[in-house]
Image: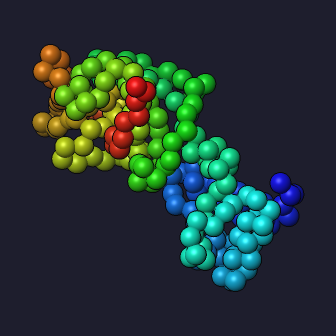
């Protein structure tokens, strides 16, 4: 592909970063606001990126673009960052050498972590040992959310409920017992938004 000018590279990097965060391709308005362009200037740079083969237009809408297939595959790549026990909490460890590609749009945007499930305590929700749990980073949960929880230096995948100064970790597999821990020891890392599984 042709070499990009400095400003074209900056616009291209901006669109890639948005996709890496799980966000849609930036609109003309967003690009213009970020760089201080007029809309016509933002469109000019997108057309230059399209002409050089870095992006392609998906529909006739002026700002509806995608990265090319090769670049999209890389932008939609997730690194496995840890194992998350669906059982007794275990120490966090890095598993980032393994990665895979899937469309961020499936998970509704935001910062997404990919965590390998270990154990079967959430099998009542069709979450099995070896699955990849897609976790959207957020600090709060509600209702029936399944959450990635940090308890001191351990993590686990559970629903939980507060009871005064205690937190109850709730498995969906009846063969696993409810576990109680101090509420102050629990940190919500994010919400389960999808499962990836090899068959």
Above or below, 25 against 167 in this view is below
Q: Is residue 10 left or right of residue 187?
A: right
Above or below, 123 against 75 in this view is above
Q: Quadrant of residue 19?
A: bottom right
Q: Quadrant of residue 62?
A: bottom right
Q: Is residue 25 left or right of residue 125?
A: right
Residue 1 image point, x, y percent: 83, 54
Residue 43 image point, x, y percent: 69, 77
Inspect this view and state whether residue 188 appears. no
Rendered residue at 51%/57% (across/down): 23
Rendered residue at 39%/21% (across/down): 130
Q: In this view, does 111 lie to the left or right of 14?
A: left
Rendered residue at 38%/47% (across/down): 138
Residue 162 image point, x, y percent: 16, 38
Q: Nearer the viewer, residue 89 or 124?
A: 124
Q: Looking at the figure, which quarter contains the C terminus?
A: top left
Q: Is residue 38 left or right of residue 171?
A: right
Inspect this view and state whether residue 107 appears. yes
Residue 137 image point, x, y percent: 42, 45
Q: Nearer the viewer, residue 199 or 137?
A: 199
Q: Which of 62 and 121 is in front in this view?
A: 62
Q: In which quarter of the image is residue 28?
A: bottom right
Above or below, 126 against 22 in this view is above
């Amino acid at each position: 592909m042709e070499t990009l000018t400095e400003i074209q590279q900056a616009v291209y990097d901006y669109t890639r970063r948005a996709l890496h965060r799980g966000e849609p391709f930036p609109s003309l308005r967003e690009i213009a606001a970020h760089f201080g362009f007029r809309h016509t200037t933002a469109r000019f740079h997108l057309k230059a990126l399209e002409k050089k083969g870095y992006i392609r237009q998906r529909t006739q809408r002026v700002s509806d673009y995608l990265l090319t297939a090769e670049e999209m595959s890389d932008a939609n790549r997730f690194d496995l960052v840890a194992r998350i026990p669906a059982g007794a909490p275990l120490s966090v460890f890095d598993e980032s050498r393994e990665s895979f590609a899937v469309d961020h749009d499936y998970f509704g945007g935001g910062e997404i972590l990919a965590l390998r499930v270990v154990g079967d305590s959430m099998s009542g929700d069709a979450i099995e040992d070896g699955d990849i749990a897609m976790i959207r980073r957020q600090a709060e949960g509600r209702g029936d959310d399944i959450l990635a929880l940090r308890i001191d230096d351990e993590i686990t995948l559970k629903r939980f409920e507060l009871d005064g100064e205690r937190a109850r970790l709730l498995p969906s597999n009846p063969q696993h017992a409810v576990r109680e821990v101090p509420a102050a020891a629990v940190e919500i890392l994010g919400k389960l938004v999808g499962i990836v599984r090899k068959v």
